[in-house]
Image (cartoon, rainbow, N blue to C red):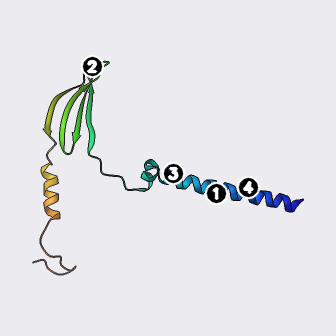
């Protein structure tokens, strides 16, 4: 009796394994499933700021590829108010840090005088 129960249990586990393997193979061909395991692309668009104009309408400042666009949504028609706004320019302190990191002097050992 226990041998029969053991065989039925082994068959059920084998069948469950086959079903699980078939499910994984089927899902791995689905682009949404395979996207879980791939590197995410860099984001090209973001909402920089938004302001509520009235209960229905809002202004959105959207940046795409470094260019900003001012859009009003929520009315009878969504409209682009201004397009092609240059993004914020880097501040002078961030430019100084960037220039310092691009130094062309060769490194020197600790304790040696810099040339």
Q: Residues within 10 Å of mark 4 (few under 14, many from 20)?
A: few
In the displayed orientation, state which residue is furthest to the right.
Answer: 1
Spatial CA distance of label 4 from label 2 is 60 Å
Spatial CA distance of label 2 from label 1 is 55 Å
* Residue 5 % position (x, y): 84, 57
Element on which disc 1 rests: helix
Label 3 vs 2, first from the N-terminus: 3
**Where on the picture, by quarter, is residue 64?**
top left
Label 1 vs 4, first from the N-terminus: 4
Element on which disc 2 rests: loop
* Residue 62 % position (x, y): 23, 36
Circle 4 is placed at which residue position? 12
Identify the residue at horizontal 26%, vertical 46% (top origin): 44
* Residue 40 % position (x, y): 36, 52
Image depth: mark 3 or mark 2 in front: 3
Label 1 vs 3, first from the N-terminus: 1
Circle 1 is placed at which residue position? 18
Identify the residue at horizontal 64%, vertical 57% (top origin): 18
Label 4 vs 3, first from the N-terminus: 4
Spatial CA distance of label 1 from label 3 is 14 Å
Identify the residue at horizontal 27%, vertical 19% (top origin): 75
Label 4 vs 2, first from the N-terminus: 4
Q: Is residue 14 left or right of residue 112?
A: right
* Residue 75 image label: 2
Circle 3 is placed at which residue position? 27
Element on which disc 3 rests: helix
Label 2 vs 1, first from the N-terminus: 1
Q: Is residue 13 left or right of residue 98?
A: right
The quarter of the image holding the N terminus is bottom right
CB within 8 Å, label 1 to label 3: no
Identify the residue at horizontal 18%, vertical 38% (top origin): 68
Q: How many marks?
A: 4
């Amino acid at each position: 009796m226990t041998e029969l129960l053991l065989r039925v249990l082994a068959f059920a586990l084998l069948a469950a394994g086959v079903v699980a393997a078939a499910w994984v193979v089927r899902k791995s061909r689905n682009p949404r499933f395979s996207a879980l395991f791939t590197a995410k692309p860099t984001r090209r668009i973001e909402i920089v700021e938004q302001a509520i104009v009235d209960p229905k309408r809002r202004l959105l400042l959207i940046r795409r590829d470094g260019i900003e666009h001012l859009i009003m949504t929520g009315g009878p028609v969504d409209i682009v108010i201004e397009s092609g706004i240059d993004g914020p320019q880097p501040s002078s302190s961030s430019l100084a840090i960037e220039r310092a990191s691009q130094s062309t002097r060769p490194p020197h050992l600790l304790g040696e005088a810099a040339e």
